[in-house]
Image (cartoon, grey):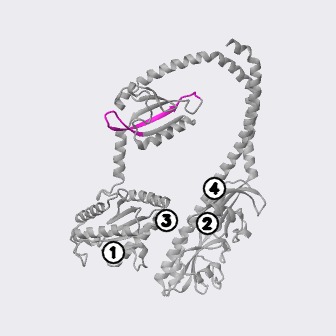
Amino acid sequence: MTGAIKYLPARTFVAVAFAVFGFVGLIVWGEYSSWKSQVSHVEAELIQTAKALVQHADDTVDMAKFPLAAVITQIQQERGAPDMPAKITQVMKSQVDTTPWLDALAVIDADGRMIATSSSIDASGLNFSDREYFVFHQSSETREPVLGRPLKNKLSSQWILPVTQRISNPDGSFGGVALAAFILTELTNFFQGFSLGSEGSFLLVRRDGVVLARAPFLQTLLGSSVSTYDLFTTHLRQRGSGSYHFTSPIDETQRIGGFYRSEHSGMVGLAAASESETLATWMRGARIRWMSCFILVTITGFLVWRWRRQIMLRRASEALLVAREAEFRLLAEGSGDLIQRFNGHGIREYLSPSVREIFGVDAEAMLGTHILENLHEDDHDVVSQVMDRLREGSTRENMVVRRKRADGKQIWLETTLNRLPGGTGGTDIRIVAVTRDVTRQKNIQEELDTLANTDELTQLANRRSFNIHFEDMVLQAAQQRTPLSILMIDADRFKFFNDTYGHAAGDDCLRALADVVRGSIRRSKDFVARYGGEEIAVLLPDTDGAGASKAAENIRQRVAGLRLPHEKNLPWGYVTISIGMATFYPARGERLTTGELFERADHALYRAKNSGRNQVAAAEQEASMATGRSDIRSV
């Protein structure tokens, strides 16, 4: 100690010089990291803003489909009536009154004349056959709503975005166009709700590069194509969302842009902020940090004095550590929870007496054992990862694992692990773990989960559980490139069964069907659920069309073999089922969502119903259906 104090001035000088140079280096690196962090933060916010813009535009366009559907339905109902234009006009005005963002609804006949509109402005003498949307529908047979280029309303001279839908005559020929026009300023006003600074900008673009809206408003840009810009030629080809830095070709401003492309409509949103404004925002915070650094350098002398004092207090600290160790043992031995201490290798160095109650063994027998000993093998990876994070610097971790007691009983343990201060990292650390037995709570939770995912009547999985498993199985099939089949099973003429025998007998019938399906599916990885009403869904992973067809036919025959009386189900006179099946083949390059795969099976079920019932139909052999689902259910 005396020698250390004697040479303290020289050592202090070297330490201070080293600290100053090191501190300057840290400041430079820290400021660079701060700037990069600021840019990354701005980029992330711009992407989220672009996403919000596109989703709002998607919602707005989707909402236009409902007024159009109402108008077209009215046209079909009133076709040929002498007062049809008046009735259509009444419907359109009602729709516009309940939809604030709509500028107008209109119906244009096959010659381009407006025969009805919600606008009070006289449209006589105007012809719309030159409009892009009119020409498109005249040559296209699509009956879906289409988003057109922005244009000026011939009646009100306002800028609008048209959403149009073809009107077909009974013979399928072109009968005109139904138009829903929403006000472009409503969309740009929504853009202005996001603050991107005085030099920020927003851009909404159709999937083919046509500009739909811009803020600040720029009339010359509306309807033009930006498909040759870097956004389309480079960035959108690589990913659906992201950020990039660019110089605006419109005003030469250097900006940071965040873009997002809708998977639903293909529309692209671009939110951009000025780089100079972003830098100015960062500089305001940087000045404060630089002033703080000056203050920190000033107090370096105080820290040197504190260092000298720490040398003198070292021995006192060591004595304090010994006292804390004794205090730790006193607290641990009085706790009902199990207190353990591990070294960096996961070896137990201490266990509190409560180990006898929780593990069923004395503490002395557990000393020197590894943390993985007697743990369930499925939990080994979880524990190993927790230990790795603690060795890498994490100070606190939590885990719930299974362990075998000395009497062979499996219990659930909730453990909080805290890394003690000190050590050089890696395996040179000490860890304190607090463990409690949560077996009872875990069992209660599992019982609640079972109740929440089971259909009460049939004891099959319910629709909620089906949806979760369906998503997981489609994802797993796509990743492993293995086929996945789905069976949709429906009892034939079940409404007549309930009407004839009563709902109590109907419930018994459903339970019998569920038992047959459950007994026919033997693999543990297969999944059976009551989808709703008299429908049962079966998921068959790693099963191709031939295997699914065999399983479906087996189920159909076993149900028929029950000979459950059903006098209204002719010509059989007993309960039968129809089954629709579909198979997802990722190995063939198919890419399907759960909705698309389900729709295939559902359409196959329709075909089985329409073809006479009591049969299996596969989606791959599906023909055009003459009737809808509502027709099948009404029989």
* The residue stretch that appears in magenta: 401-423
What distance separates the C-alpha of mark 4 from that of mark 2? 14 Å
Rendered location of residue 25, percent (x, y): 75, 36
Q: Is residue 396 left or right of residue 552?
A: right
- The image quadrant where one finds the N terminus is top right
State if disc 2 and disc 1 touch (CB < 8 Å). no
Mark closer to the chain start, 4 or 2: 4
Image point 50% across, 84% down: which residue? Answer: 84
Image point 35% across, 60% down: which residue? Answer: 529
Q: Check disc 3 and report the residue beneath it.
A: 587
Q: Is residue 413 magenta?
A: yes
Mark closer to the chain start, 1 or 2: 2
What amino acid is at disc 2? Met
Q: Check disc 2 and report the residue beneath it.
A: 267
Q: Check disc 4 and report the residue beneath it.
A: 47
Q: Residues within 10 Å of mark 2 (few under 14, many from 20)?
A: many
Mark closer to the chain start, 2 or 3: 2
What amino acid is at disc 1? Ser
Rendered location of residue 467, percent (x, y): 42, 59
What amino acid is at disc 4? Ile
Q: Nearer the viewer, mark 2 or mark 3?
A: 3
Q: Check disc 1 and report the residue beneath it.
A: 634
Q: Residues within 10 Å of mark 3 (few under 14, many from 20)?
A: some
